[in-house]
Amino acid sequence: MNLIHPTAIIDAAARLDPSVEVGPYSIIGANVVIGARTVIGPHVVIDGHTTIGEDNRFFQFSSIGAQPQDKKWAGEPTRLEIGHRNTVREFCTFNTGTAQDKGVTRLGDDNWMSAYVHLAHDCQVGSNTIFSNNAQLAGHVEVGDWAILSGFAGVHQFCKIGAHAFVGMYTSLTQDVPPFVLVNGNPASARGVNIEGIRRRGFSRAQIDAIRAAYKTIYRSNLTLEEAKLELLEADADAEGAAQVRAMRDFLGVASRGIVR
């Protein structure tokens, strides 16, 4: 109990691992579950049906698990699920889901969420992502593993951002971003492959070349998306790069708002 500051208010029904640390003036609601070694800083509010894994750190003034900012929400017991080893900086707002979608907002593992990041209802964020200051997701957005959102990037509801994609500063995103693609601008447009990001993550030369070739098929060949999918299906990609080409092709099949061109 010496890890919990005496000014913190924790509902008796909340379930906190004994190793959880809670700072001054933080408030934790009845339906909250927090895993081992997670640190809750001062002035943090965690509410709703919220489950938080192990080894996370929440900095001051964040609002986690509040009801969705959606007029259709009618008090349903929707949820927020946060994985392990995430860093959540100051003034972040993560909302629970809605009954009109999955009913749950999810954040995976090992994510870095900078100050003022907003995850709206029903967002599904993978693992190892980086959200810079003031990156904002509207409802129902999906973000793949290792994606990066730069400062003040804003994402329209129902958009999808593929794994290893990069969204530039002040980008207004209203369409989907395929894996490995770098987008920037207002409105957003594709600027190439996120070469620096995939190099840092240890992608081989063959994999990078396959990604570049797939990008050219999608963006530089004057093909429709359906034609590009067929071209990628028939592409004789090096075995080392086949998985990356397949990921880009499969994304085209699930893109719901059209892709950034």
Image (cartoon, rainbow, N blue to C red):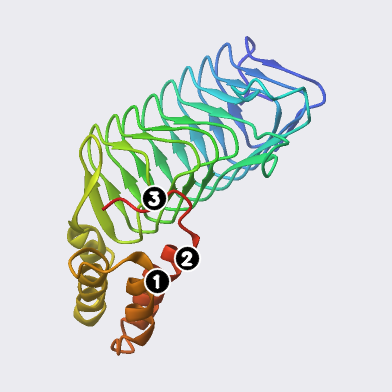
Mark 2: give few (<14), some (14-19) or many (20+) Cα within 10 Å. Answer: few
Sequence-wise first label, 3 or 2: 3
Seen at 49% across and 35% down, the residue is: 57
Mark 3: give few (<14), some (14-19) or many (20+) Cα within 10 Å. Answer: many
Return the residue at label 3.
176
Return the residue at label 2.
253
Label 2's element? Answer: helix
Q: Quadrant of residue 65?
A: top right
The reply to whether discs 2 and 1 touch (Cβ–Cβ < 8 Å) is yes
Q: How far across and how far down the image is residue 71, in percent? A: 65, 20
Label 1's element? Answer: helix
Vertical order, 243 against 201 (above or below): below
Marks 3 and 2, Cα distance to the nearest angstrom?
11 Å
**Residue 245 or residue 108, whichever sits in front:** 245
Amino acid type indicated by mark 3: Asp
Seen at 44% across and 55% down, the residue is: 144
Marks 3 and 1, Cα distance to the nearest angstrom?
13 Å
Return the residue at label 1.
249
